Amino acid sequence: YSLAVVVAKTGKKVLLIDGDLRSPSLHQYGGLKNDRGLSNLLAGASIEDHIQFDSSWNLSVLTTGPIPPSPAQLLSGDRFSGLISQFEDQFDHVIVDLPPVLGLADAILMGRCVQGIVYIIKAEKTPLKAIRGSLQRLRAGGVRLFGVIVTQVDYSKHSYGYGYGYGYGYSYGYGDSGKANVE
């Protein structure tokens, strides 16, 4: 939701789609109803009255709608890519919140229909093995990766910055060994 809000704040017309047909959640962030949405459109319904508008963020949202019995089957046809094409004609930006990559075909099937994806990693929570496996599945599935966003970074544990300094030292004398000390 955050990425879509940031883009919408630039004055662009944005559509955010909840693509997680198994575990929908975006409707909760915007306080929207989830009684109709993407699953209805994939099953053949017309677009009218399925897109909701979140006026607090100036953002259009397509929730998932009812959870279908077989999301992968709904996504296997050409309907999703056709919907994306229609939405790209109506909106400046179409952002699809995909389901998790590992374990399901849904993200790969949807990822092939969009221009590219941004992979989201939760800092210190997403195991490196899962990240590598997900990225490998996306590449193998022919999904174009635009980049990665790391969320929930605990800045108290990490620091970033740069510095510079200038130092000069000189010493001369004899230490405990009796030999000359020169630095």
Image: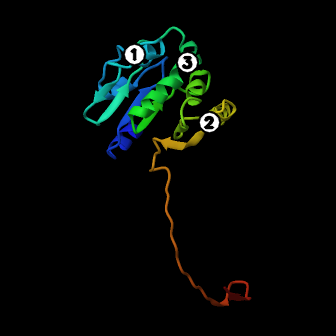
Q: How is the image coloured?
A: rainbow
Q: Position of residue 78 (x, y in %)?
A: 56, 20
Q: Which residue is mark 3?
A: 75
Q: Residues within 10 Å of mark 2 (few under 14, many from 20)?
A: some
Q: Residues within 10 Å of mark 1 (few under 14, many from 20)?
A: few
Q: Amino acid at mark 1?
A: Ser
Is 132 placed left or right of 51 in the picture?
right
Is 177 placed left or right of 147 in the picture?
right
Quarter-of-image position of residue 140: top right
At x 55% / y 43%, what residue is drawn? 148
Q: Is residue 109 above or below residue 72?
A: below
At x 39% / y 16%, what residue is drawn? 46
Q: Quadrant of the N terminus?
A: top left
At x 60% / y 27%, what residue is drawn? 108
- Between disc 3 and disc 1, the foreground one is 1
Mark linked to residue 46: 1
Q: Position of residue 79 (x, y in %)?
A: 52, 19
Q: Quadrant of the C terminus?
A: bottom right
Mark linked to residue 131: 2
Mark 3 or mark 2, earlier in chain: 3
Q: CA distance from mark 2 to mark 1?
A: 37 Å
Q: CA distance from mark 3 to mark 1?
A: 16 Å
Q: Secondary structure at mark 2?
A: helix
- Between disc 3 and disc 2, the foreground one is 3
Mark linked to residue 104: none
Foreground residue, 19 or 104?
Answer: 19
